[in-house]
Amino acid sequence: MAHVVNEFANLTTPQTHHFKPTKPVSKELLQQVKASLRRRGAVAYDMWLPETHYLPHLLHKGENIMGSVFGRYSLTRDNSVGRAALVATDQRVLFLNKKPLFMQVDELSFSIIGGVTFTSVLIMGFVTLHTRLGDFKLRTFNLKNAANFVDYVETKCLQQISESSDKLDIVN
């Protein structure tokens, strides 16, 4: 039985990299990720956050960052709060909460996202990502970045809906 357990422990899956110690990423890759975040509206403060520095470890080859939100979060499923980032790529949405001795990563496919809400009050914005796993709510002060994230997620969700309805229309 111990032999079977050892074989299972050595299996590599796409998720394995989240739980193994990571090697430092190259400066070029980190600069590419930062440049992509800046093009989408992230500010200089966001570049110093631990979530930004860990993000290159989570991205797959060929995956592109399309939007992001950095801020204080609250989750409805377990009533947790803290600072984190929501990063939309062309393939999925990542919820990343990285601290020195703690890390929480949730990978959300666009098929489980029910919608996204953006509310602004004076200089603050609130982005709520409604999913089957619960709501991810972030408070941010970067309204431009939040608006870009919301626009991309809405567009991607609408594409998912139209693609699924097209498949249903083909039935004879």
Image (cartoon, helix red, strand yellow):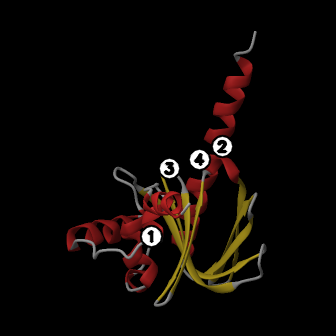
Q: Of the residues shown, which amino acid type is indicated by label 3?
A: Gln
- Tell which circle, 3 or 2, labels the residue nearer the N-terminal end: 3
Determine contact: label 3, label 2, CB under 8 Å.
no
In this rendering, position of residue 93 left or right of residue 41: right
- Tell which circle, 1 or 4, labels the residue nearer the N-terminal end: 1
Q: Of the residues shown, which amino acid type is indicated by label 4?
A: Lys
Q: Determine the image quadrant of residue 137.
A: bottom right
- Look at mark 4 in the image and give the residue it sits on: 156
- Look at mark 2 in the image and give the residue it sits on: 158
Q: Secondary structure at mark 4?
A: helix
**In the depicted structure, whether residue 152 falls above or below residue 106:** above
Q: Secondary structure at mark 1?
A: loop
- The quadrant of the rendering that contains the C terminus is top right
Disc 4 vs disc 3: which is toward the camera? 3
- The quadrant of the rendering that contains the N terminus is bottom right
CA distance separating discs 3 and 2: 14 Å
CA distance separating discs 4 and 3: 9 Å
Q: Residue extending furthest front?
A: 1
Q: Of the residues shown, which amino acid type is indicated by label 1?
A: Gly
In this rendering, position of residue 58 left or right of residue 164: left
Across and down, in percent, residue 131 comes to 73, 59
Total labels: the figure holds 4
Q: Residue at x 35, y 50 (%)?
A: 62
- Count neighbours of disc 1 (C-alpha within 10 A) and say few if under 14, some if 14 to 19, many if 20 or more: many
- Tell which circle, 4 or 3, labels the residue nearer the N-terminal end: 3
Q: Determine the image quadrant of residue 165.
A: top right
- Look at mark 3 in the image and give the residue it sits on: 91
- Tell which circle, 1 or 2, labels the residue nearer the N-terminal end: 1
Across and down, in percent, residue 70 comes to 53, 78
Q: Residue at x 74, y 68 (%)?
A: 135
